[in-house]
Amino acid sequence: MSKRMFRLGAFALVALGVVLVLPQSAPRPASLLLLGGVLIVAGGALGWYQVRDGQVVDRYRLAVEHLGSDQAEVRLGGLDALEQIAKDSPRSRQLVDDTLGDFLRERSPWTAAEPSGPAVRSLDVETALAILTRRPGAVIDLSHVDLRGADLGKQTLAAAVIRRSNLAGARLLGTCLDSAALDATDLRDADLRGASLREASLRVACLEGADLRAADLTDADLRGADMRAVNLDKAVLTGARVNRGTLWPPDFTPARVSASLFSD
């Protein structure tokens, strides 16, 4: 119903504009002729956007169908189509991002029952991850995804939601994770050198063996987190929130990392 009304509105604008600009028995004021021209242009643009939106919907539907294929090359084609839709239609960007996140949870899920060790990801999973993370400013959801050993170095993942995922051994060198939600995420042995985790939530996250040299954890929530990192040299923990469940390396002292911790 809404699409039909949309088309009628476009047609009405064009029709009214034509009436105003067509020659009449009596001369028309210049203002009416100008208004008629504006209405014709506006109606044409309105109709064009309607057609374009319909094409985007059809392209999106076909791309999603391809993602469910048993053939890897077909799935890759669907991923390419989704990326192109996001480029062509900025309004569809969040829908594409959500679809890619769901695809990763389907193709590369993570549960606590999964075995440890390096992950072997298929090409379509790697492609989906690359598409999702290479657009700065995107608010993405990578929760419950197996990301072991993933190379996300120097990416901008501010405000990303990555709860209960596995980033063990991941490369996060210089990555921006400000305000990211990393609750209960496995970050064991991850390379977080120079990473920015300002105001990030790492509640009950595991960073045992992680390299946090020069990482910025200002105002981060570390309650219940395993912070027995292999290296905390020059890490910034000013205002970080901790509690009795927060675990530290045996030789850890706030003075050593120039930190001012806020304890519950």
Image (cartoon, rainbow, N blue to C red):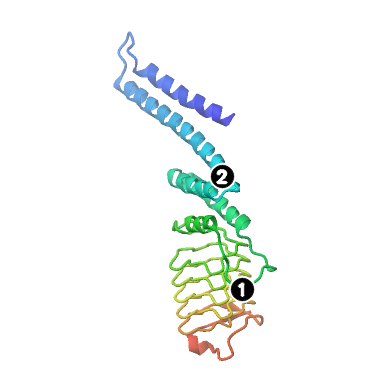
Along the polypeptide, which appears first: circle 1 or circle 2? 2
Image point (54%, 43%), residue name: 63
Q: Amino acid at mark 1?
A: Ala
Which quadrant of the rendered structure holds the N terminus? top right
Give residue 47's quadrant in the image. top left
Q: Residue 90: image x %, image y %?
A: 46, 46
SS under mark 2: helix
Q: How many marks?
A: 2
Give residue 104's quadrant in the image. bottom right
Question: Is 243 rendered above or below residue 201?
Answer: below
- Residue marked by disc 2: 66
Q: Residue furthest bottom?
A: 251
Q: Residue 74: image x %, image y %?
A: 54, 46
Q: Residue 212: image x %, image y %?
A: 50, 79
Residue depth check, mark 1 versus mark 2: number of the one nearer the observer: 2
**Toward the viewer: 28 or 46?**
46
| Residue 205: mark in rendering | 1
